[in-house]
Amino acid sequence: MSLALQTFSTVKDASAALQAAGSRYLGGGTLVVRAANEGDVSVSSLVRVADPGLSRIAVSGGKVRLGASATMAAIARHPELAALAPAARAVGGPAIRNMATVGGNLFAPAPYGDFAVALLALDATVFTEDGEMPIETFLTGRDTSRVIVTAVGFSLPSMESFRFLKVSRVKPKGVSVLSIAALLQRTADGTVTSARIALGCMADRPIRALATEKALLGSKLTPQEIAPALAAAGEGITPITDPIASAWYRAEVLPVHLGRLLSQ
Amino acid sequence: MAKVPVQFMLNGSEKAEFVESGTTLLNALRDKIGDTSPKGGCHQGTCGACSVIIDGELRLSCLTLAETCIGADIKTTAGLAEGGVLHPLQRAFLDAFATQCGFCTPGMIMAAKVLLDRTPNPSREDVVEALSGNICRCTGYEPIIQAVLLAARANSQNAA
Ligand SMILES: Cc1cc2nc3c(=O)[nH]c(=O)nc-3n(C[C@H](O)[C@H](O)[C@H](O)COP(=O)(O)OP(=O)(O)OC[C@H]3O[C@@H](n4cnc5c(N)ncnc54)[C@H](O)[C@@H]3O)c2cc1C
Ligand code: FES
Ligand code: FES
């Protein structure tokens, strides 16, 4: 196996090099170096950007901007990002979190991509060399994307409005059976005024639970009101099958875990 | 394949080598520099046997390219003993029977070291979390957890 690493100081120069056949961008390398170690010959050269600015985390005026090279460990320990810490901590073990980047997580195929599930619920904007786009547009087109992601941005959720759950079989750390992120805005009496729910492992990439979101509007999250939202959770899902769980199993347990998350 | 020069600090001494571009740090350490303390268990990030400390952070040397470590400060289990005296973690692993075949031990010790460097008096949960990326096929984990707690106690007694 031969693998050449090219290091650039700017995203612009790296983007040009990335257009060559067989080249892939190197983030933390937890997926791409792993693929090379496994003998994936489709990767012959890796391109990276040595710009510390890409690792920057900025929180101001209720807005968050995470540089694409920011690691899960850096997010998990950031004092102003406590609401996101559970999602960042859900990724791998300590060494993986020190390496795994936000940018790489956006590309990680299910069962990976737990942090991207959180970003989808938060309606993040994905910034690239060529401009910005909503995360949903990004996720749809990511397989053919050749652009370098530079950052993601979103409004900082309050601790009360944002909920995240990852279900795995190996404790304390394991690959996802599924993951769920929910951003719920509620009035003082608890009525849901807006709901955005994202699911991991329910397709090859994070997807929204649109029917559930709709069913929750106007509810106060009582068990009676949650029931129809859970019944709708299976709409539009095509869960993955892997050694952790079958598609059937994932679909069966989704309403159970979603119900627990919503009635917290 | 073009060779590239890499230079970094390893356990306090400067190392310089030529490696093929794309060589993992694990292979560079074991095959070029001769530090065989990090082990290659899976080369997939799953077992943790290759764990090393780079600039104070735990990392997997099998998924790290040697070229990305130029100028870094790297620590491995081979550098822990001082003048033939074992590091408290090494001592504790022996005393608590936390090592059987020993293959996971250097990775476990690296993971435990970053924990104790930051959290000198960890709870059991802290230890379990810190070791959660490291697999052991022999011990059943309990002796390893006990060894890390023992080393923490030994450290705090020495400090007192
Ligand atoms: C043992 C193990 C356990 C894991 N556990 C989890 C887990 O629990 N949850 C989870 O979500 N993931 C998990 N992962 C997967 C992975 O570590 C994470 O998804 C991580 O966030 C990927 O980021 P990376 O920087 O390492 O990606 P890389 O491997 O560097 O890159 C992955 C892909 O994304 C592309 N890419 C990366 N950054 C950019 C960018 N800025 N612009 C354009 N393209 C880019 C690369 O070209 C590559 O195709 C695990 C991996 C391992 C090895
Ligand atoms: S060899 Fe690196 S994690 Fe197994
Ligand atoms: S002692 Fe054999 S793998 Fe842990």
Image (cartoon, coloured by chain):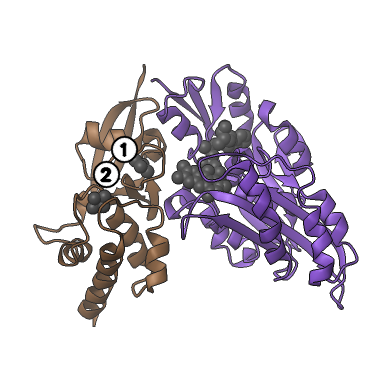
Chain colours: A purple, B brown
Label 2 chain ID: B
Q: CA distance from mark 1 to mark 2?
A: 7 Å
Q: Nearer the viewer, residue A211 or A140?
A: A211
Mark 1 crowd level (few <14, some 14–19, many ≥20, 10 Å Cα) = many
Q: Which residue is at 34% across, 57% downward?
A: B111
Instruction: Identify the mark at residue B26; answer none if there is no mark.
Output: 1
Q: Farthest bottom residue?
A: B160
| Helix, strand or loop for disc 2 | loop
All told, the count of numbered labels is: 2
Q: Residues within 10 Å of mark 2 (few under 14, many from 20)?
A: many
Q: Nearer the viewer, residue A44 or A208?
A: A208
Instruction: Say what amino acid the circle numbered 2 marks.
Output: Pro
Tell me where residue A68 sits by quadrant: top right
Q: Is mark 1 within 8 Å of ligand 2?
A: yes
Which numbered marker is on residue B38? 2
Tag 1 near tag 2, CB within 8 Å:
yes
- Where B119 falls versus B18 (above or below)? below
Relative to residue B148, is residue A211 drawn left or right?
right
Q: Say which element carries label 1.
A: helix
Residue A228, given in percent of the width and then of the height, sits at 83, 60
In the orientation shown, which residue stands out farthest toward the right? A218
Q: Which quadrant contains ligand 1? A: top right
